[in-house]
Amino acid sequence: MPVFYGTEIASRMMLGTAQYPSPAILANAFRRSGAGVATVSVRREAGGERAGQDFWALIKQLKVAVLPNTAGCHSVREAVTTAHMARELFDTPWIKLEVIGHTDSLQPDPFGLVEAARILCEDGFQVFPYCTEDLILCERLLNAGCKVLMPWGAPIGTGLGLNNIYGLRSLRANYPDVPLVIDAGLGLPSQAAQAMEMGFDAVLLNTAVAKAGDPVVMAEAFARAVEAGAMARKADPMEPRDMAAPSTPILGKPLL
Amino acid sequence: MPVFYGTEIASRMMLGTAQYPSPAILANAFRRSGAGVATVSVRREAGGERAGQDFWALIKQLKVAVLPNTAGCHSVREAVTTAHMARELFDTPWIKLEVIGHTDSLQPDPFGLVEAARILCEDGFQVFPYCTEDLILCERLLNAGCKVLMPWGAPIGTGLGLNNIYGLRSLRANYPDVPLVIDAGLGLPSQAAQAMEMGFDAVLLNTAVAKAGDPVVMAEAFARAVEAGAMARKADPMEPRDMAAPSTPILGKPLL
Amino acid sequence: MPVFYGTEIASRMMLGTAQYPSPAILANAFRRSGAGVATVSVRREAGGERAGQDFWALIKQLKVAVLPNTAGCHSVREAVTTAHMARELFDTPWIKLEVIGHTDSLQPDPFGLVEAARILCEDGFQVFPYCTEDLILCERLLNAGCKVLMPWGAPIGTGLGLNNIYGLRSLRANYPDVPLVIDAGLGLPSQAAQAMEMGFDAVLLNTAVAKAGDPVVMAEAFARAVEAGAMARKADPMEPRDMAAPSTPILGKPLL
Amino acid sequence: MPVFYGTEIASRMMLGTAQYPSPAILANAFRRSGAGVATVSVRREAGGERAGQDFWALIKQLKVAVLPNTAGCHSVREAVTTAHMARELFDTPWIKLEVIGHTDSLQPDPFGLVEAARILCEDGFQVFPYCTEDLILCERLLNAGCKVLMPWGAPIGTGLGLNNIYGLRSLRANYPDVPLVIDAGLGLPSQAAQAMEMGFDAVLLNTAVAKAGDPVVMAEAFARAVEAGAMARKADPMEPRDMAAPSTPILGKPLL
Amino acid sequence: MKIKVNGKTVETQGGTLAALLDELGFSGKKIATAVNEEFVPATKRETHQLADGDRVEIVAPRQGG
Amino acid sequence: MKIKVNGKTVETQGGTLAALLDELGFSGKKIATAVNEEFVPATKRETHQLADGDRVEIVAPRQGG
Amino acid sequence: MKIKVNGKTVETQGGTLAALLDELGFSGKKIATAVNEEFVPATKRETHQLADGDRVEIVAPRQGG
Amino acid sequence: MKIKVNGKTVETQGGTLAALLDELGFSGKKIATAVNEEFVPATKRETHQLADGDRVEIVAPRQGG
């Protein structure tokens, strides 16, 4: 099972907490999937409001590791200040670092990301950078002190799956010992299974589960697919071949 | 769960019995996968020999439905006589009908297949035809009396997955109520999950499991992937979209 | 250049004559593309009507080989009678044989196709069967007397390209000496180039050209793409490789 | 036709000068392809040596624009000094800027690339950056003063084609008015045609041509494919559709 | 007598297929014919006697893919 | 007389298929049989007389995909 | 004096950040704070004096992906 | 004094870069130069004094992709 900054997680599935039809459905999605990490955010709250407090109560009873994010931050400063507020609020050094560089694609900004990662790592944060499959960006993030990488499969919320199989394979091959999480873009369990077969350590999902017709069943579907892919990797799959080969033995076939 | 000729099977995974490193591994692969159907063949045996008798003892204790095949038959006559021997030997009307038309690809012969299916259905067999995704071939097989279809994903033993996604989708769409099993060609669990997401009812595997480094673990991996794909289909997946959409709400983002 | 029943054609591009915005555009599409074969049909005409006569006048001045089709025929009888009328009308033994088996996909009916092909070949026709990539179907068509095969890339009018690359490769590999034409389904010149790179002898197009914003320019685009693909095949392309290799020599690089 | 820094080029094909079997074949590849730009490098030469002088004589008679590169440079300083030597040597402000960040993939280093681009643009160079499809990297390069971008299709010398179709489409959509050249990774003309259909302005090739069995024929094949793709883009292709649509009119079909 | 020509009923005094084509104004036109789903070559039109209720198809060249 | 059993020639004094199976040690074993490419059900083995040159196939359950 | 709290202008007699949070009914709630884009930890709220025009952000846990 | 030219140590009595190029037979050839990783334009070669241990790079046009 994946180990993030010394903490082993009991599941290869990480799940977002946004966009569910109801808190009850959110809770059931977590239970049925066995997800071991929940991503959360920090947002404004007024004195009278209870939303944040109620949400927190809900999350606590899930008994999962909490990974706050800096979603929506476009500048290094925003991301760093948000990370500090999150660390105090959730009492965790973990931070899913998002520094968005492009509004339509929500693509990470490689430049801001590395700078923010360096600042936060030096300040004792344990950074989970939402990044691309770019090998040099990833190397810089590791040099900045990140011990986990979270490359996108496709842009957030698209459900397109793995847009750059070659690039992702190459990232895996270059960093065999770094925990790699496919974050964002998955739409179907088969895509999550494929990511595991390619050797990734975990997936982080939100929209594909929360926006499914039945989020609870979809959460379990992804959980099983992720296990399936990880087991397949471990079981050492056959090599694909172009020419057919009979499975049933030919020897002993009666002459009829 | 899939219903074949009135018999409901407790699993969407069907498993071949050939090419395993040992009988024990075969048995464990079935147990761990929960496969509900085992394919078997008929082969020559000498008076002194025990192989067939021992194999049968092994299969019986698996407590699964047995689906004998006509593997390796290239003519209608061969296939029909083999089916008759199999029906008596395994005491079942079920027959996985293979009429091979091309040696390198082991492609089914559409012409011989329809003829053999007609003869066997008239004779009371319950035919599981190993076929292609060809819509007209499949219509003829249904007209001949088949109540299940088993289109290939790719040639037997190649592990290439689903070679003609468009054709398979179109087959599923044209026969929404006929049990459709992807038979042959799968190499990875993610491919099996994808077949289920496309709406197929089951998969039949052999080489990908038996020839994996660890067949038992791979059998379970496929079983989970198949469940995952079927659940995903049921849970109504999100529509993929080209443009990104934030999962974390933008509303309430602090100004930093 | 492809040789069909002893006639060498000066172009690997064959073009349909339907759906153009105007006769002038049709004529220019042929001129600019250099297409060597035009497909035509037979349809009812009333005594007063001139449509057929005018169309024929137009086609004659294109100075290309004419390939009449049996488009829309669903039965062997229809196809055979239509072929006879076409042979007299266009004074050619060539016939593009369509026996449609499925209305939505316009998929060829393998069974009717082989029967009609046999009847027509015995009657002296030179048959161009519109078929699938099915290896056994294609073998039967060759045995029936066909000396050209025209497998679909995708269903007529879809513009999806090559739906079953594996199957088409395998057909090419099995019949290295039979002229193979990709008929139907192409939407873009890059797809036509790919078909040529795979070793096909020609492509037959209609919708992708006639329904383009500018059919004349699109016709030329396809013509160039087809030449490009055929030349590439002849020039023996490099083997793709997973790892990068510098093109610029490293030797002699200054130390800076 | 593409315009680079105010200079219109008569062809959408740019060709490298390395790895050809002989100078004569190099020259013929250029002639037959009509390539309008030749990439070159600077390398050490000894006093007695003639190689560089002879090579230069060969290039001059090609009568094409010369684009020197900084191939093999891994640091900003190397790249900048190399660019200066190239500017004097070839008497052109054009420079194909390579700052390699990863040895196995020869992936551009986004960080070094932007810095070197800024330095060179400020110094009056007209920079052609060899980059990835990363949207933010590309934005920074434009801000640094680049007026052309050359994203990779796949790593140099692999011949894999377009590894990240989605990312390349998205780059094209975000910068409709910036000349975009697919540089590196192409192996087949159909891939070059596809790049043009996607709206790219040109391709830069070397290995796929020089390492083909017949580089001269392959050069022409690529040239035609590039034209084909560009014409197709201009001609406004049909929309692909899932369901078939007959090309031959159904109206007037005789009843047989 | 009544004959179906290209799906439409036509009243004619009958006779040969050639006569019918003449009567309908097809003389000199590039056409091909079938009667009751059987091809009738041009060479047979003179001698092919039509019967009441015959189904005649008359086709000409047309656009095709 | 000579009979081909699973492709090998066997010398036997003949009689029924049942007798042959007995002679070859198949009694009590799970098998199925065909003679000259025709299936012979277990219920017919007692009465099925073999002739010189007959081709007998005897099969048992085996691994299959 | 006037202070912007989560983007809205608030009239307050000023004092410390802690006082403001009290006044606005945040006591005992799970929140984090920033003033003028700088994070202010809980431990500093008592001593952090607000000035006219300060921009205060008060955030709580919320759904995230 | 000793100078590295294109990676090889060369013994020369020194002087300007131009003199060195002359001495090494580069006169009239299409080349560009750098000394100690800094580009030295042709116009500066006459005046550029070499020092012991300098690293000189001399490049010419070459094949590139």
Image (cartoon, coloured by chain):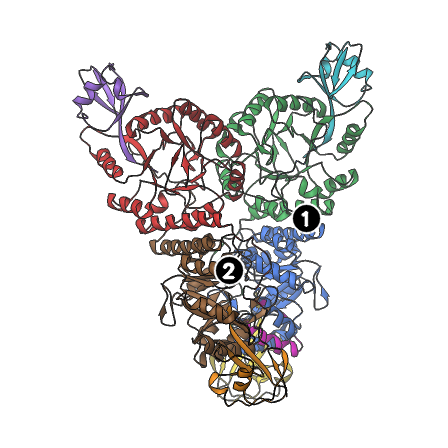
Chain colours: A green, B blue, C brown, D red, E orange, F yellow, G cyan, H purple
Q: Callout 2: helix, strand or loop?
A: loop
Establish if G6 lies above or below E6: above
Marks 2 and 1: in contact by CB < 8 Å?
Answer: no
Asked whether A121 or C49 is in front, the reply is C49
Establish if A95 lies above or below B241: above
Amino acid under disc 1: Pro
Amino acid under disc 2: Ser
Residue A96: in magenta span: no
**Which region shows up in magenta?**
B110-130
What is the x, y in percent for residue A146? 56, 28
The chain ID associated with circle 1 is: B
Establish if B99 lies above or below A15: below
Asked whether H4 or F52 is in front, the reply is H4
Q: CA distance from mark 1 to mark 2?
A: 45 Å
Residue B119: in magenta span: yes
When asked about the image quadrant of residue A205, the answer is: top right
Residue denoted by label 2 = C22
